Amino acid sequence: MTLYLYSSLFLIILFLFYLRRTSSTLFAPAAFLAVKTSVPVIISSFVSINFISVGVSSIDYTYIISFASLLAICLGYVIYPTRALYSFHNLFARFLNQLSLLNFKQKLLSSVLFLVLAVFFILAKSNFSPKWITNPREAYETLRLGIGVFYAIATWSLVLLYCTALFRFKPYKVRSMLIYSLIFSFLSLFSGSKGLVASIIIISILYCHLFVRPLGFLWLLFVALAPVLGVPVLNLLLGSAYDLNLNYFQYFNSTASLVEAFQNKSLPHFSGLITIENRIYSLFPSSMFGTSNIFGIYRLHEFLNPGKLELGRATGTLFWASYFADAGLIGVFVASFSIGFLLRFYVSVFNLFASFNPLLFILYIQFCWFDAFNYAEHLAIVPLIFILSLCGFLGRPYLPRLITV
């Protein structure tokens, strides 16, 4: 662990020096991704190292894979040919621009409409259970079966409504920004989703950085650490204090168990099947395939804890686990390199916009920072269909200025 810690810190520092030379701030998506990639490994391995249930060789190999993943992400970002692909950046930017032709009033009305309709269907399908008020986390875990699409649309609508409110009322002071953040964070608690609450908080920080006052690297560390260290607090607020134990930090332990299974040939590599299934099945409601149909990353969850998926629970793993299951260390390196490469592409595209509107802002967050649209792949059709359906309320467009030099 010590060797991984020092090696990762050295690599991240080198990467930050590169970012400092190429941009005006370290509060940037690439720095966030580098820190976010290494933090779960360090924290989860530190917490579980004394009672980890796999051999030393598997532990060491898990550290090696984690470092290879971080290295590949940095390399993919650094060697990206920005100038050579400029015309493609401009084309993609114009496409995103067309998705955002909607004025503020129509954005607010369409967001509220989708939110109200989705919430109504959720309550109706769950027999108007009071658990959504009294114990949202329990409702989240036990009442979402068969209503996943409506639940996702409700969370997306709340996120979009929040971004629209920020751009409509323009809170240019930290105090007023905090009020908006508290209001929507409180509303998001009733979803029972820790991810949605975290999304509202992180969106608030990013809006503050871009439009209120620039934030430094310490805030970047806070944003990267918040999803890991803030979960116990969210569990308590969401009524699931029984989750407040060290089992939450078992990412490293569970991933090392998978690595050992592949080393011992008790689990075969899937030759890309998991990644393909993850991409295909993410485009459709899981209820279409039944609870007994295990696919994608759920194959690994079922191997780690048989029968737990039927209870609506899954064992967390490090992000590269599915890539390793598909093609070993080479698969992890190639996939991680692609992540860094694509991030540089997304950053280059959004740098073409001199100003943002709510949809462009949320798409910038979705592509460059984290999944603000929870439960959706970056390039999945579902969130784009959702956005395009909102754009059906077209009126006088609100266009950001697009740099074309």
Image (cartoon, rainbow, N blue to C red):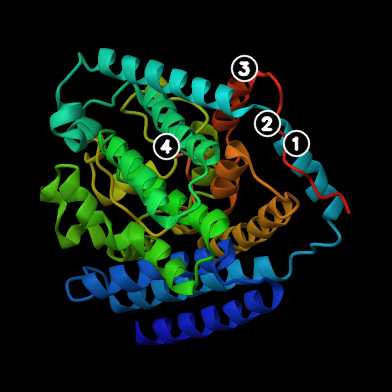
Label 3 is placed on what type of residue? Answer: Phe
Q: Nearer the viewer, mark 4 or mark 2?
A: 2
Mark 4: which secondary structure?
A: loop
Q: Is residue 250 visible?
A: no
Q: Give the image quarter of residue 53.
A: bottom left
Dot 2 or dot 3: first in sequence order is: 2
Say which residue appears at 73% left-offset and 49% top-offset. Answer: 353
Which x, y percent locates residue 235? 20, 49
Say which residue appears at 56% left-offset and 24% top-offset. Answer: 105
Q: Nearer the viewer, mark 3 or mark 1?
A: 3
Label 2 is placed on what type of residue? Answer: Leu
Which x, y percent locates residue 239? 14, 42
Q: Are marks 2 and 1 in contact (CB under 8 Å)?
A: yes
Residue bearing the label numbered 2: 99
Say which residue appears at 14% left-offset and 22% top-offset. Answer: 130
Mark 3: which secondary structure?
A: helix
Residue bearing the label numbered 1: 95
Q: Is residue 336 found left or right of 395 in the rendered image?
A: left
Residue bearing the label numbered 4: 295
Residue 159 drawn above or below residue 198 = above
In the foreground, 398 or 288:
398
Mark 2: which secondary structure?
A: loop
